[in-house]
Amino acid sequence: METKKEKKENKNKNAKTEKQVYDFAKKIEYEYKNILLLKTALTHSSYANEMKSKGVKAECNQRLEFLGDSVLSLVTSEYIYLKLKDCKEGELTRIRATVVCEDSLFRFADSIGLGEALFLGNGEIITNGRNRKSILADAFEAVLGSVFLDGGLKAAEKFLLKFIEKPIEDIVNEGEIKDYKSLLQQIIQQNSGEVLEYALVSETGPAHEKIFEVHAVLNNNIIGEGKGRSKKSAEQNAAKEALALFGY
């Protein structure tokens, strides 16, 4: 049987847990019908395993992550399909891949302080799990999955669009729709022995708003410079500038 002290400690712990979940729900501006879905979305497997070892049942967020991944792809695909009517299938695929990649999901999660809201095992806390890219990216998908289960596709769409609209706009403005790297590579390969590389020059700004600067280097000579919110977009912009040298 629990002692009075243990009962009091457990009561305080439960109150703290409940507050943590409700506070995060307010932060993402979504009112849950079933708040337990959000609690599950915030529960990492390391925490669930620790609770299990103590005889306490706690479901981790892996199943919600699986669901959220599908919702993420569907909502993003529909949005860019309707928004970018002049883009071909390959271009839409490249845009979607950029928006739903781990780096992007990490930035979305970081922007809402998701790491601080997670329930992590002691080992993950000690090893800085609250800032680990893979943990935050997976948790973001889990939160999206919880919104979908609680409120349906429209609710999930409303939640997600706040994060993906600006990055998609940036991709279009930065010229990442066209695959300039592939075109440049095709031109370079026409002459055997040519070596084309991309060198990361700098990486500035906070985690969720980093700016990368890259040089396109041909045989140790800089032929293009580019900046972007990801290494890929910076490389594309460097390739775009380099193509101008070849009359493209």
Image (cartoon, rainbow, N blue to C red):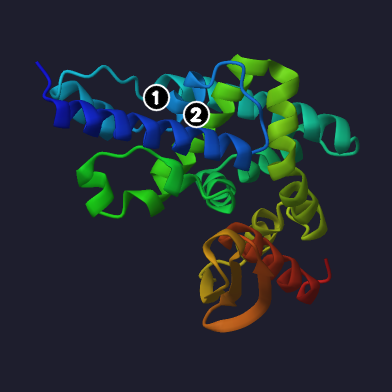
61 vs 238, left or right, is left
Q: Which mark is residue 79?
A: none
Indicate the quadrant where residue 233 lies: bottom right
Label 2 Cα crowd, 10 Å radius (few <14 / some 14-19 / many 20+): many
Residue 132: percent from left, percent from top? 38, 51
Q: Are marks 2 and 1 in contact (CB under 8 Å)?
A: yes
Q: Nearer the viewer, residue 248 or 67?
A: 67
Q: Which residue is mark 2?
A: 142
Placement of the C terminus among the 4 image quadrants: bottom right
Q: Nearer the viewer, residue 201 or 129?
A: 129
Please determine whether, in this image, residue 111 is positioned above or below residue 76: below
Residue 91: percent from left, percent from top? 75, 41
Report helix, strand or loop for mark 2. Answer: helix
Q: Earlier in the sequence, mark 2 or mark 1?
A: 1
**Residue type marked 2:** Ala
Please determine whether, in this image, residue 177 is positioned above or below residue 73: below
**Residue type marked 1:** Gln
Q: Residue at x 82, y 30 (%)?
A: 81
Could you tell me if residue 122 is visible in this image? yes
Q: Which residue is mark 1?
A: 62
41 vs 44, left or right, is right
Q: Nearer the viewer, residue 74 or 143?
A: 143
Indicate the quadrant where residue 7 lies: top left
Residue 234: percent from left, percent from top? 64, 65
37 vs 3, left or right, is right
Q: CA distance from mark 2 to mark 1?
A: 7 Å
Q: Residue at x 14, y 24 (%)?
A: 54
Q: Residue at x 57, y 62 (%)?
A: 231
Report helix, strand or loop for mark 1. Answer: helix
